[in-house]
Every structure is written in structure tokens, then in C-alpha cells.
Amino acid sequence: MGVTQIASCGNVPMIGLYQCLITKERAGPLEHPCDFSLNMPTPSSGCSKNLNSMGIISAKDVFHAAEKAVRLN
């Protein structure tokens, strides 16, 4: 069980960043109304276990998700 699954027990906003091998649909909370998690875009070269590219998720996307989460409170 991961942090977002534990956080989903409460009705609190959450943002998780998921790598392309383990997406939020696969490992994140299911149908949680306060989940603003983001999947890493899959690079054109495809996904691999050696891929260290969470930096592909832009700061703009993270800030946008955070703005949505903050508006809930």
C-alpha cells in the first residue's frame, strides 16, 4: 500500500506523481474526488525500468494540480 492509498482514506486533496511503468490508474487511489495525481508522459523511446525521467512532468502541471487541490479547502 502506498502513500496515496493511505491518504485516500480521508477526504483530503492529494497529488501523486507516477512513473510511466506504474501509472496512477494502476497504483493510485480509485475514483477519489480529491485526487489530482499526474502520470509522467511516456517518452517517445518508450518506458523502461532504467528510465529516470520524472522531470518530464513539468512544474507547470504540478502547480496547476496544486491549485486545483487548494481550491477544495
Image: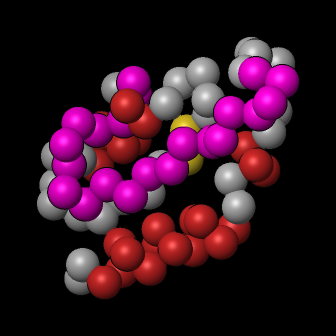
Q: Is residue 54 left or right of residue 38?
A: right
Residue 6 visible (yes or no) = yes
Image location of residue 13, percent across then percent down: 30, 64
Predominant secondary structure, magenta span: loop
- Residue 11 versus residue 21 in the image, above or below: below
Q: Is residue 53 left or right of residue 30?
A: right
Image location of residue 12, percent across then percent down: 23, 63
Image location of residue 51, percent across then percent down: 81, 26
| Residue furthest out toward the front | 44
Instruction: Answer whether residue 44 is magenta in the image.
Output: yes
Q: Is residue 37 left or right of residue 54?
A: left
Q: Place residue 54 in its image quadrant.
A: top right
- Residue 67 versus residue 14 in the image, above or below: below
Q: Which of 42 and 30 lies nearest the eye of the viewer?
A: 42
Image location of residue 37, percent across then percent down: 44, 51
Q: Quadrant of the N terminus?
A: top left
Q: Place residue 58 in its image quadrant.
A: bottom right
| Residue furthest out toward the top | 49
| Color encoding of the figure | secondary structure
Labels in figure, total: 0
Q: Quadrant of the C terminus?
A: bottom left
Instruction: Answer whether residue 42 is magenta in the image.
Output: yes
Look at the image and give the residue range highlighted in magenta.
Answer: 26-46
Q: Place residue 72 in its image quadrant.
A: bottom left
Residue 2 visible (yes or no) = no
Q: Which of 28 and 57 lies nearest the eye of the viewer?
A: 57
Residue occupying the point 20% across, 49% down: 32
Residue occupying the point 57% across, 74% down: 63
Residue occupying the point 59% across, 65% down: 61
